[in-house]
Amino acid sequence: AAAPSDSPTIFDKIINKEIPATVVYEDDKVLAFRDIAPQAPTHILIIPKSKDGLTGLSKAEERHCEILGCLLYTAKLVAKQEGLDDGFRIVINDGPKGCQSVYHIHVHLLGGRQMNWPPG
Ligand code: 5GP
């Protein structure tokens, strides 16, 4: 896994349409697109268009409260759009021990199969 840093990531290229992604939702603040290596039949990443220092949840400041809420609300909208009416899983990996690999905060939306707990 890459060391945590505030450098641009592959997600900036997706936001700027420099590399393709299957976008399922977009507004002025957030972008949602399908994960390139899906871990479930539905696996979508929800990210802020402006990182604003939010490399991961552990870097959140009070100014980020609104965008953090938008990410979760978007997850709900996309879950509905994807027909995940029987349930879904939201994940935010943080830091090396959380298996975070891209240092631009993102919410994973996983569904379309039974999710297990504990996750391991
Ligand atoms: P993390 O491990 O940081 O929580 O999640 C990063 C996610 O980004 C991984 O699930 C990985 O498959 C996904 N990912 C990495 N590069 C790309 C890419 O270029 N396009 C898309 N759509 N997903 C990517």
Image (cartoon, rainbow, N blue to C red):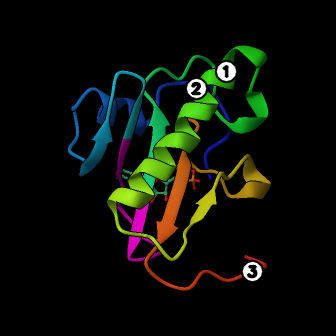
Instruction: Say what amino acid the circle numbered 1 marks.
Output: His
The CA span between labels 1 and 2 is 5 Å
* Residue stretch rendered in magenta on the structure: 32-43
Q: Quadrant of the C terminus?
A: bottom right
Instruction: Say what amino acid the circle numbered 3 marks.
Output: Trp
Marks 1 and 2 close (CB-CB < 8 Å): yes
Tell me the residue that label 1 is attached to.
64
Examine the rendered structure and indicate whether residue 34 appears above or below residue 70: below
* Side (left or right) of 8 relative to 82: right
Q: Residues within 10 Å of mark 3 (few under 14, many from 20)?
A: few
Residue 38: quarter of image: bottom left
Residue 117: mark: 3
Q: Does the segment drawn in magenta span residue 6?
A: no
User: Residue 48: horizontal and vertical position, in percent?
Assistant: 48, 30
What residue do we see at 78% from left, 35% from top? 58
Q: How many marks?
A: 3
What residue do we see at 55% from left, 72% from top? 87
* Side (left or right) of 12 relative to 99: left
Residue 73: mark: none
Examine the rendered structure and indicate whether residue 108 appears above or below residue 58: below
User: Residue 68: horizontal and vertical position, in percent?
Assistant: 63, 32
Instruction: Say what amino acid the circle numbered 2 marks.
Output: Ile
* Side (left or right) of 34 relative to 58: left
What residue do we see at 47% from left, 42% from top? 74
Tell me the residue that label 2 is attached to.
67
Examine the rendered structure and indicate whether residue 107 appears above or below residue 16: below
